[in-house]
Amino acid sequence: MPIISLKNVSKTYKAQSKGADRDGKLVERVKKKSSRLIEAVKNLSFDIKQGEFIGFIGENGAGKSTTIKMMSGILYPSSGEITCCGLVPYKKRRENAMNIGVVFGQRSRLVWELPMSDTFALYKEIYRIPAERYERNVKTFVELLEMGEFFTTPIRQLSLGQRMRVEIALSMLHDPPVLFLDEPTIGLDVVAKKNIRDFFRERNGRDGTTIILTSHDMKDLDTTAKRLILITKGEMLFDGSAAALKSRYGDESVAEFTFAGAPDKLSVAFDPAKRKLSDIIAEAGSRGEIENVEVKSADIEDIVRKIYNG
Amino acid sequence: MRYYLHLGWVYWKMHLKKTWMFKSSFIINRVVQILNYFVDFALIWIMVNAFQALNGWNTYEVMLLYAMNVMGYAIGGFFLDRTILTVRTDVQSGAFDDVLTKPVSPLPYLCFQNLNPNFIAHVTLSIALLCIGFGSLGTYIGIVEILKLLLGFVCGGLVYVGLFLFAIGPIFVFRKADSMRRVLFFLREQSMYPLSVFPLFIQILMTVILPYAMIGYFPVQSILGKQDYLFFGRAVLYLAPVISLAFCAIAVWFFHFCLRRYKSTGS
């Protein structure tokens, strides 16, 4: 039985748009307004099994955050059915909240003036976490996310990376079986990103926490998610593994040649399934003495960029 | 409810801790608040001395109307004055999503998260004015009068809670709905005068649509035994708790109706 299930889910917004006169100029004095419907999510269906690590991909405005907000009970879908841990999230929002942890990378829930320990203590009361479990979880997360050195520092004095670690610990304090992570690594440096990715992988592997992660940094997804769901303009474009994505949309590699005595490099894109690297090297050799050759395989970012660009 | 009271206590302790970190700001705020009340009190004295009688209501009776109004506003403001600011800021920024991902009912959670203890000073002011007013009038205050007064406080609190909720609801739908508070509260100052001085349509408006008359006019009228029942007759005195409760219940329903239409913001 899936832990999360979406069946034909759509979300439509009514948006106000300013009218224009016959010449196409904006009517400045009398601003005629008309409403138009925006379909943020269109007929989306998928199931997620317990313990899966899902990478949710899409360009800005693709409908990723809207879908996450519907799955977490923040928004009502316009049509379709959603269940999370056997509950309809927007109808049983309070019960559903006990089963989920949510991190919005661009918003903070921390009490700015006080140390993290105060926000943790507040969440202990909100989620009615038994004292023993609370102590154990705080100890575990402080160790795993290396937060000991700033445990008693007011939040306002922490770096972005440190604050994000606190946010992540906060979302997992009540041991939710499902974790929604909306851009949790945004604005972080490479070291902080890697530490957070490692933490997610560890939690997913050890506890079987189901993780749904959205990120514009494809490395986040390439190194963590076992399954990718790609949506564009609210519709699903792909659902499968990274390998399947590469095979469907072209696993293009690039060979980059440096020639002796020549300042310019030669880049040759090729599909390893169709052309042998040895043939390409032989062909490039006819142009001059090869000093170095570097071959780069396509990563998810290249493929997604290719899909977005049509 | 015990759960939300407990959360309120936890938030209150955090608020004190935060406040204590900025001691100078705390002290300045308290000085400003005391000055505010001093000015309020001075204005009442001016009012008391400027008017001799308003449609049969003398100055001390008008002071009682003011005192009841302050008490009702204090009860509503204690729970919802800070809430309206929090909701407005959080809905516009999208931070309100956080409330909906917690295992709480939004309305009691918001009330107890944003308790505003500054309104305790309003309660003190109201009680002081009531003592002065009833004392000067020589009104007998027995058990029945105290119960009527307490019921008046409850009615006033319910009406103000309702007014705040009607002002908060549209924020969920339109994100920016500052004018709602101004529209709903525009009769607040008028409600500090006897209802009988206003034209009939204002009397009806303030009795059944925006029932400001339940806050001060009818409770004080009942205690003082005044006879100007207006268009509605004596029955309105007994209906005041029902009208206040119904107004607040409709406001609660309206709050949830609007909340279901919350659209969040882009990330």
Image (spheres, rainbow, N blue to C red):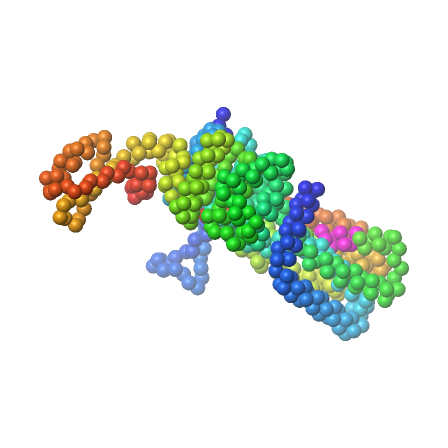
Seen as rendered, the residue at the extreme front is A149
Does the rendering let one see residue B263? no
* Main SS, magenta residues: helix
Of residues A299 and A249, the one nearer the viewer is A299
Does the rendering let one see residue A245? yes
Please state the horizontal and vertical placement of residue A42, each as a whole percent of the image. 42, 38
Is residue B152 shown in magenta?
Answer: yes
Please state the horizontal and vertical placement of residue B76, each as a whole percent of the image. 69, 54
Of residues B84 and B28, the one nearer the viewer is B28
Residue sitting at 64 percent across and 57 percent down?
A: B20
Range of residues picked out in magenta: B151-158
Residue sitting at 27 percent across and 37 percent down?
A: A297
Residue sitting at 62 percent across and 37 percent down?
A: A129
In the rendered view, tell whether residue B67 sits above or below residue A264. Answer: below
Determine whether, in the image, residue A162 is placed left or right of residue B135. left
* Count of numbered badges drawn on the protein: 0
Residue sitting at 76 percent across and 52 percent down?
A: B154
Quadrant of the drawing holding the N terminus of chain B: top right
Determine whether, in the image, residue B21 is placed left or right of residue B55. left
Seen as rendered, the residue at the extreme bottom is B50
Of residues B170 and A260, the one nearer the viewer is A260
Determine whether, in the image, residue B122 is placed left or right of residue A155. right
Of residues B209 and B115, the one nearer the viewer is B115
